Amino acid sequence: MISITKQTAAILFFSIFLLTGAFDALAQRDSLYNVINATGSDSIRINCYKHLSRYYLDHKNFDSAVIASDKGLELARKNDMVPDIEFFQLKVRAYDALMQYRNALDQYSLIIEVLEKSSDPDDAVRLTLFKGWQLFRMGEFTKSIESFEEARIAAQERDMQKEVADVYLGLGRVYYNLKDMDLEALYYEKYLELVDMDKEKYLVFYILTRLGDIMREQEKYEEGIDIYYKIIALSKEVGDSLRVANTLNRIAWGYYQMGDLENSLKVYQECLDLSKELKQKNLIANSYGNMGNIYRDWNYYEKAIEYYNLSIEVAKEVGDIYNLTWLYKDISAMYANMERYELAYENSKLHSAYNDTLMSEDYSRRLVEAQTRYEREKSEKEIALMEIRLQRNNYLLYGLGGLSLLVVVFAILFIRNSRLRARQRMEDMNHRISELNQKNLRTQMNPHFIFNTLNSIQYYVFQNDRISSNNYMTKFAKLIRKTLENSEHPAIPIQEEIDALELYLELESLRFKKKFEWTIDIDEEIDTYMYKIPTMLIQPFVENSIGHGLMHKDGKGYVHIALKLDDSCIHCSIEDNGVGREKAMEIKNGKKENHRSLGTSITETRLRLVNSLYGKNMKVKYTDLKDDKGNASGTKVEICIPIIT
């Protein structure tokens, strides 16, 4: 009788797994874990972790993909094995999906570090290739193209087809960012000629989708639709129903752009049926809305309204701001064509509100991206300066090594002085960056007030109230002009800030039909023309008091702004008698609103920058006010502003 050990069985099982791949998804995962736990061979366990990472990527469990890759790398380091660079590539894909782009960029540095230690000529080609990817990620597109081309020539000479395919993929990505669709499509097509379709099926899906989109953008609709149907066939082979639904949505829109409304409606119905099976409510809302557009174009307005309402209902259920934005815009246009101007105006206001929220979310995303780029560039500059400093110091040490003690002493003094100068230059650079970043944040203040004011002016125009319209427009124009003038300076006299704040409060009071009163008290010891404060510092907190505190209050409200002179700062307080922060949050959650005002968060970021700029410790303190019975009676915000002259 033949005896088979547990480890031998695990090795045989893993070999069969690699050769056949004949397992369903969950069986693959569980079987890989069984092999990891059963085998004593670390090389087999490392390969299992690689397959696990691929499995988690294919099933969109990106955190687990990173963990599996890290375990494989840790095991390789433990056994003094050269790390497999595919682990780093898998982590790049996972971090990209998680939108952790800084972490993804770091993986290329680790790949390059491994390849630089190799003496394999093939690894020299891969080194050039991955340097191209790293340069692409850093936004240095010209250098990236040069590196990719160098890698392509070397890879073709050594008949490294996979690396040639990766070069074409990289060049396609570069030209996508350069918005050159012709070259992008050319290199993607070259990539598809060389790539292993089975191994890289999800990347192939992405590229085919992009090629279809390029055809549509170039008005080659039939060619784009043919590519989309190829994606559907491949997706059905691997059982990816969600990709089928998304691609049907693209096909239907392609037919709509061609003017073939009958086929567009037919395909949208297919997409709708499949989306309902998959419970993909964003796709359901989009299909309903576009079917409404088709009936609108056929002048079947009642049918169009029926589908629009179904779309709005589903979109609101999942908080789909994008679909709601274009839906209300198209509905407003339809009612305008029907000469039902009141309904057109109401839907136009809803479009403006949702579009405002969409823009705010975009501002937030771009702010995060800008901060990420700033941190990355700052780190790169620090590293470059450090390398220059160390290199210079090495030259000095080599040159002075054989001289007398006196010369050595002078050399040490010279090095110390050089370091002090370098540190001073670094501080000056950070100071300038802080000023530029502060100015950038000032330009991205929340646009809600502008949109709401324009809506109010539009309302007075519709009411034929010329006096109110003119009065409102005059004050609004003064405020915009003053805001533009003030935004040119990092700090302005207090009087300029107060003038702008008074205009803002007058506009808000008019807009809300004098629902609240306001007062501004300034300490007599404050010279409002001599003392300065950061631009637009107070207004976002006042806006918060009105929008979240007073607008939900029954009866008349008030806002009291006070400026007092302390020993080392100007103490500013904003007090209201609104519903309080806790009640405001309950109301917001009750309405299921996705909008988040950026005004105060950006202002608090600016406070931190001002602190670093002037060496101050400026803070914001929030106090929830209570009446004698312990009920909320308002909110008080206190800011200690440094004195700037």
Image: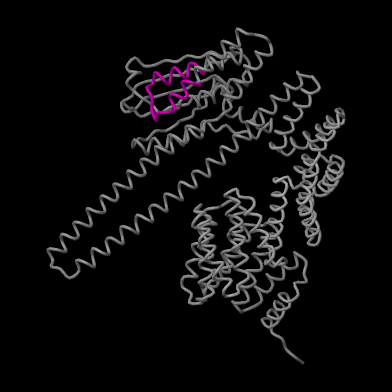
Q: Is residue 481 magenta?
A: yes
Residue drawn at 61 percent across, 79 percent down = 41
Check residue 471 for magenta coloring.
no
Q: Quadrant of the C terminus?
A: top left
Q: Is residue 331 above or below residue 56?
A: above
Q: Position of residue 286 (x, y in %)?
A: 77, 40
User: What residue do we see at 18% from left, 57% from top?
Assistant: 413
Q: Is residue 290 above or below residue 380?
A: above
Pick the quarter of the image with the N terminus: bottom right
Start-end of magenta stretch: 480-504
Q: Nearer the viewer, residue 578 or 46?
A: 46
Q: Which quadrant holds residue 525? A: top left
x%, y% of residue 231? 77, 56
Between 30 and 18, the one nearer to me in the picture: 18
- For the point 52% across and 61% down, the residue is 132
Main SS of the magenta part reads helix
